Amino acid sequence: EPEVTQTPSHQVTQMGQEVILRCVPISNHLYFYWYRQILGQKVEFLVSFYNNEISEKSEIFDDQFSVERPDGSNFTLKIRSTKLEDSAMYFCASSGQTGRDTEAFFGQGTRLTVV
Amino acid sequence: GENVGLHLPTLSVQEGDNSIINCAYSNSASDYFIWYKQESGKGPQFIIDIRSNMDKRQGQRVTVLLNKTVKHLSLQIAATQPGDSAVYFCAEPSHPGGYNKLIFGAGTRLAVHP
């Protein structure tokens, strides 16, 4: 069964450092997403990406965040200068079709710990 | 998107019993809802969805009910098993015209006891 894969599973970084979280979406999908989940809280939307550009982003997704699809298979989330409050689970998701009512498949997540 | 939230943060049931997890929404224009299951250490997993032109939809051991009058939906799990232990989220897309953004509710933890 196709799945979204994320690496690494756990990333520990010092405050102020840059991190790149990596995702390989399902191969024939067209829409890509990043979500985050602070421990014990609900899943929050960060950004959606379609046709090689951001289609929507939340207020969380400030100038410290960026996304890229560098090679047609990977989808990355970069945080330029991490803050303690960036510690969370980050989930990548992808969906295949245009329009609504399309199931989004989530990866297993990357746990980011900023110390 | 508007607020999508849950009534109960934790639900404990005996193995074999039926479970009902509830969700309220506030946007009367919402027309599509999804239930996700999140097991410990994993990402959300799609369970079942429902469109607003339906009141009920059934899957394998799961049923989603939608009451548009009171803006409430529920997930019913029949014969709950230990493997059903997880956090369950209701969610909806934020825009009627596209699927760019899911708004998740707060989640309900389901604990199944033998």
Image (tube, coloured by chain):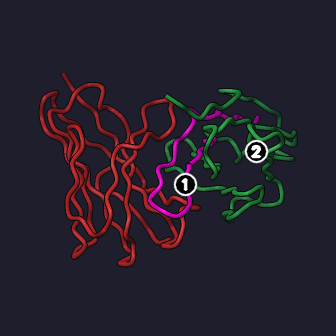
**Which residue is farthest front?**
A28
**Relative image position of residue A56 (x, y in whole percent):** 67, 65
Which chain does the residue under circle 1 lie in? A
The answer to whether A74 is drawn above or below residue B89 in the figure is above
Q: Amino acid at mark 1?
A: Gln
* Residue under numbered circle 2: A77
At 30% from the left edge and 43% from the top edge, which residue is drawn?
B10
Colour assignment, chain A: green
> Which quadrant is home to the C terminus of chain B?
top left
Residue A88 position (above or below residue B28): above
* Spot occupied by residue B32 in the image (x, y as percentages of width and height): 38, 64
Q: How many marks?
A: 2
Tell me which chain the residue with mark 2 is part of.
A
- Boundaries of the magenta span: A90-115
Q: Earlier in the sequence, mark 1 or mark 2?
A: 2
Q: For numbered disc 1, what is the local secondary structure?
A: loop
Mark 2 residue element: strand
Residue depicted at 50% across the width and 71% down the height: B1
Chain identifier of the red chain = B
Residue A52 lies left or right of residue B26; in this view the side is right
Residue B85 location, quadrant = top left
Residue position for label 1: A97
User: Residue B21 location in percent, x, y?
Assistant: 25, 49
* Pointer 1 with pointer 2, Cβ within 8 A: no
Q: Give the vertical position of B57 relative to B10 (above or below).
A: below
